[in-house]
Each structure stands twice: as structure tokens, then as C-alpha cells.
């Protein structure tokens, strides 16, 4: 495995993605619309008002995801799962976004100034989305090993965002090589922890710069933790894309509600990730231009009592205080016991001309 040098500039729609611009924030609607088009539209509107740069759907049917059976493996058995006891088929039926909604939701998002795209889960979904002229494709973390799907999506000549989830380095390498061989050079890899919700302790954000170096791609975070802390921290490590699940009201339900952000939290995510990005700056010492005026509030040597000509200078008539218009404190030892060259009034900033031979 080798890096191909610095990540190339990527544009999704009219938006440039990279560390030279503020992080690109994607609101993932997932199935939190609970099969209501009105709710889905309200989610798109709330995402726009929160300042998200894009919304993302998921494009599948229960039949394109799994088989309608109750055999072992097709029912969620983990007792700590949000979906314990449900069959995969029933879950996907409940969570799917109807194909008929896609065009309307995409157009609505665009009318509100956002980009809109989706994750295809099979090859026919890639063609369906391509006909709707999406600006990019997103491969979900569980589909990263579906090499035919990646090849199909990468062949469309659009940027490709891929969540890495629990993929090993060699699995990510195969996915990236497949995409590049199919003609896609604009690749964004998202660090992702495939637990729902995810714990911060399992998030391993330090993988982000390693991913960037290893594959020469733009890198971001698909975040299933609560709150915005992990996402803000990821920006400091070079994340240029942040994807978060979104819901109007966590208490109102929705398949992913437990680990989704509400509108005011999404607004905070947009603001704070941009702040984090702005704050990175460059390596700099000695203060900025903006700090110049503050330098006067450092300390310097001032006359604390009236001093007569020829009088020795010392702690009885000098003091190190704010502001900084007198001699710097580093000269204190040199000044001590020298004699005043003239009368100096209390409150005068000590200067070299006040010191006699």
C-alpha cells in the first residue's frame, strides 16, 4: 500500500472539499422519517435551517437488502441492539426511503441551497440515482466489501464517498483500488465506527491522518456517537467531511433516533466544526496582528515615588507594573542602584534617558 501524494482537490456540486475550506457537513436522514413524506420534507427544511451543506438518503428496498425469511442470521439476536428480535427484512421495510420520494426531496433540498445525494445499496440503485443527477455517491460501511457495487458507482464519473466502518486496511485498499481502476479519482474515505450508537472510546479518531497518508484521499468522519465532541475533534485531525444522522425530535422515534442529532445540535455541529477548522491556522509564535494592541498590557518598569536627580534607583522608588511603556522587566537588575539623571515624577515610564552615567 502506498500514498499517492497529497489528496487531490474534490468538488461535490459547487462545493470544494478539502482542508482549505470549512468542513462539509452532511445530514443523514436515514429512516428517521418513519415512512412519512411530510416528516422527510420537514427534516430537509430543518437541516437547511441548521446550516447543513447536504442531506443524504439511503436508496434500497427490503428486497435489495436481504431475504424475507426468519431463519437464523436474518433476525437480530443481540440483546443490546436497538432492534433486538426484529427480522432484517421488516427492519429494512420500516427504514427504507421510497424511491418515489427521492426526486421531490432532492429538488426540495436544492431549492433550500443544499446538495442532496444518497447511498445506493445495489447496482440498480446506482443507475436510479445517476438518472436523478446526484453530485456524488456514498458507499455505506457495510457495503465497502461489495466490490461490484463500488465498481458500478465509481464508473459514473462522480466523486465517491466511502465509509470504512470495520474494514481492515487491505479491505479499504481493495475498495480504493477498485474505484480508481473504474475511473474514479475523487475519493473521500470516512472513518466510521459501525456500532449504533457508538461510544467515543471506540471511535479512534487518530486513524484519520493515517487513512489520509495511506491512500492519498480526502478523509472525514461518519459519526454515530452522541453529541458533537467527536466530530469537532476530528476536524483538528484533518477531517474535511462530517456525516451525522439527523432527526427532528429524538423522543418522537425514528429507527436511528437514539444516535441522531436534533436541529439545534446540528446547527451547533456546523458552527463548532467551522470554528475548529478556523482555529487550526498555522504554527505561529509572537502574537498575531490582532494581538498587537494587547501588548501594552504587559508589564514594565515605572517610577513609584518622585525621584530627585542623582538619587539611587531601587525597589523603594521603582516598580514593575502594567502597562508596558517603560523599560522591560528584563532590565531590572541592570537598573538597580544606578542614579537618576534628572528629576523623575511618580507614574513616569522609566527609560534609558532617566539613568545617569
Image: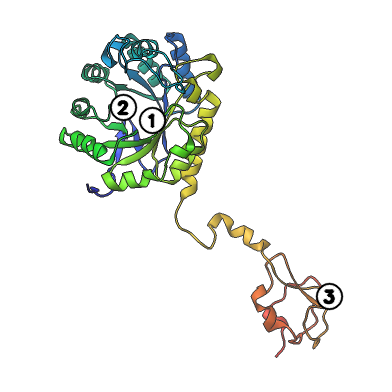
Does dot 3 land on a helix, a strand or a loop? loop
Q: Quadrant of residue 76?
A: top left
Q: Of all residues shown, which one is farthest toward the bottom?
A: 357
118 horizontally vs 340: left or right: left
Of mark 1 and mark 2, the one earlier in the sequence is 2
266 horizontally vs 174: left or right: right
Are circles 2 and 3 on residues that touch, CB within 8 Å? no
Residues 303 and 173: in front is 173
Residue hosting label 3 = 305
Which mark is drawn over residue 142?
Answer: 2
Is residue 109 something one can see in this rendering?
A: yes
* 322 is higher (above) or lower (below) than 315: above
Does dot 1 land on a helix, a strand or a loop? loop
Q: Quadrant of residue 333?
A: bottom right
Image quarter (top left, top right, bottom left or bottom right) of the C terminus? bottom right
Are circles 1 and 2 on residues that touch, CB within 8 Å? yes
Which mark is drawn over residue 194?
Answer: 1
Q: Residue at x 24, y 16 (%)?
A: 128
Q: CA distance from mark 1 to mark 3?
A: 71 Å
Of mark 1 and mark 3, the one earlier in the sequence is 1
Q: Residue at x 62, y 62 (%)?
A: 295
265 horizontally vs 300: left or right: left
Q: CA distance from mark 1 to mark 2?
A: 8 Å
Question: Disc 2 vs disc 3: which is toward the camera?
Answer: 2
* Labels in figure, total: 3
Residues 346 and 130: in front is 130
Q: CA distance from mark 2 to mark 3?
A: 77 Å
Q: Residue at x 30, y 48 (%)?
A: 213
Q: Residues within 10 Å of mark 1 (few under 14, many from 20)?
A: some
Amino acid at each position: 500500500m502506498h500514498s499517492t501524494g497529497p489528496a487531490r482537490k474534490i468538488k461535490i456540486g459547487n462545493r470544494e472539499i478539502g482542508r482549505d475550506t470549512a468542513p462539509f457537513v452532511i445530514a443523514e436522514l436515514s429512516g428517521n422519517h418513519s415512512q412519512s413524506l411530510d416528516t422527510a420534507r420537514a427534516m430537509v427544511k430543518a437541516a437547511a435551517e441548521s446550516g447543513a451543506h447536504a442531506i443524504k438518503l439511503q436508496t434500497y428496498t427490503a428486497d435489495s437488502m436481504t431475504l424475507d425469511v426468519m431463519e437464523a442470521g436474518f433476525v437480530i439476536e443481540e440483546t443490546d441492539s436497538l432492534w433486538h428480535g426484529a427480522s432484517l427484512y421488516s427492519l429494512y421495510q420500516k427504514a427504507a426511503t421510497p424511491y418515489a420520494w427521492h426526486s421531490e426531496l432532492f429538488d426540495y433540498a436544492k431549492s433550500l441551497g443544499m446538495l442532496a445525494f444518497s447511498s445506493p445499496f445495489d447496482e440498480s440503485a446506482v443507475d436510479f440515482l445517476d438518472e436523478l443527477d446526484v453530485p456524488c455517491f456514498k458507499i455505506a460501511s457495510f457495503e465497502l466489501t461489495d466490490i461490484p457495487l463500488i465498481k458500478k458507482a465509481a464508473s459514473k464519473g462522480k466523486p465517491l464517498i466511502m465509509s470504512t466502518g470495520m474494514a481492515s486496511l487491505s479491505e479499504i485498499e481493495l475498495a480504493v483500488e477498485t474505484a480508481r481502476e473504474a475511473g474514479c479519482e475523487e475519493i473521500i474515505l470516512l472513518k466510521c465506527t459501525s456500532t449504533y450508537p457508538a461510544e467515543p472510546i471506540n471511535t479512534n479518531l487518530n486513524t484519520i491522518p493515517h487513512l489520509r497518508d495511506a491512500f492519498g484521499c480526502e478523509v472525514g468522519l461518519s459519526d454515530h456517537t452522541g453529541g458533537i465532541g467527536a466530530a469537532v475533534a476530528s476536524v483538528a485531525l484533518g477531517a474535511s467531511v462530517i456525516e451525522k444522522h439527523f432527526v427532528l425530535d429524538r423522543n418522537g422515534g425514528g429507527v436511528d433516533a437514539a444516535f441522531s442529532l436534533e436541529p439545534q445540535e446540528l446547527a451547533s455541529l456546523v458552527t463548532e466544526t467551522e470554528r475548529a477548522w478556523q482555529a487550526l491556522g498555522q504554527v505561529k509564535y509572537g502574537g498575531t496582528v490582532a494581538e498587537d494592541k494587547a501588548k501594552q498590557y504587559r508589564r514594565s518598569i515605572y517610577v513609584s515615588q518622585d525621584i530627585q536627580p542623582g538619587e539611587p534607583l531601587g525597589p523603594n522608588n521603582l516598580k514593575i507594573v502594567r502597562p508596558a511603556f517603560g523599560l522591560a522587566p528584563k532590565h531590572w537588575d541592570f537598573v538597580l542602584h544606578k542614579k537618576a539623571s534628572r528629576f523623575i515624577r511618580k507614574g513616569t515610564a522609566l527609560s534609558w534617558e532617566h539613568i545617569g552615567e
